[in-house]
Image: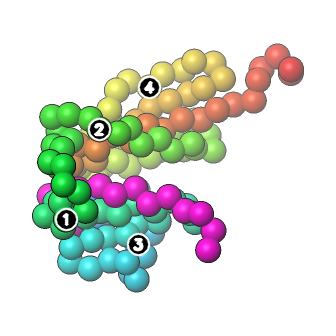
Amino acid sequence: MAMSIFINLPVENVERARAFYLGLGFVLNEQFSNDQAACVIVEENILVMLLAKPFFATFTDKPVANAHQSTEVLNCIGCESREQVDQLVKLAQQQGGKAHREAKDLGVMYGHGFEDPDGHIWELVHMSAQQDGA
């Protein structure tokens, strides 16, 4: 098995979270999904586990953070183009999320981001080739 990353996120409503991420164009892995969890495939080896908060809490002895009030992690996805960055933010807003900040154009890096309905932040970046040919 190739190394993979599973991002585990606590959610209030698994069905709502599942619909949000599928609305972004990601794919559901039915094998690891049930009424307590939804496994969403972002890329072949990048998966997001959307876990009902009580179920998520069984994996840790620490309190589960409220992502609307605090930030424990910033998830970041590298995108193929500026247009893909903007399209994912637009889709997130259409699915009930909101833009995290204004888009930032730093020349060789373009970034934007969104919050999902549970307050989890997703940064989106596109890194372009150096403009000076070096």
Range of residues picked out in magenta: 1-15
Mark 3 vs mark 2, foreground winner is 2
Residue at numbered disc 4: 103
Residue at numbered disc 2: 72
* Residue type for callout 3: Leu
* Residue visible at 75% across and 29% down in the picture: 129
Residue at numbered disc 1: 58
State which tag comes first along the sequence, 4 or 2.
Answer: 2
Counting labels gives 4
User: Distance of mark 3 from mark 1, alpha carbons?
Assistant: 23 Å
* Residue type for callout 4: Ala
State which quadrant residue 103 falls in.
Answer: top left
State which tag comes first along the sequence, 1 or 2.
Answer: 1
State which tag comes first along the sequence, 3 or 2.
Answer: 3
User: Distance of mark 4 from mark 3, alpha carbons?
Assistant: 28 Å
What element does badge 4 sit on?
A: loop
Q: How crowded is mark 3: few (under 14 residues within 10 Å), some or many (20 or more)?
A: some
Along the viewing direction, whichever of 124 and 35 lies nearer the viewer: 35
What element does badge 1 sit on?
A: loop
Q: Residues within 10 Å of mark 2 (few under 14, many from 20)?
A: few
What element does badge 2 sit on?
A: loop
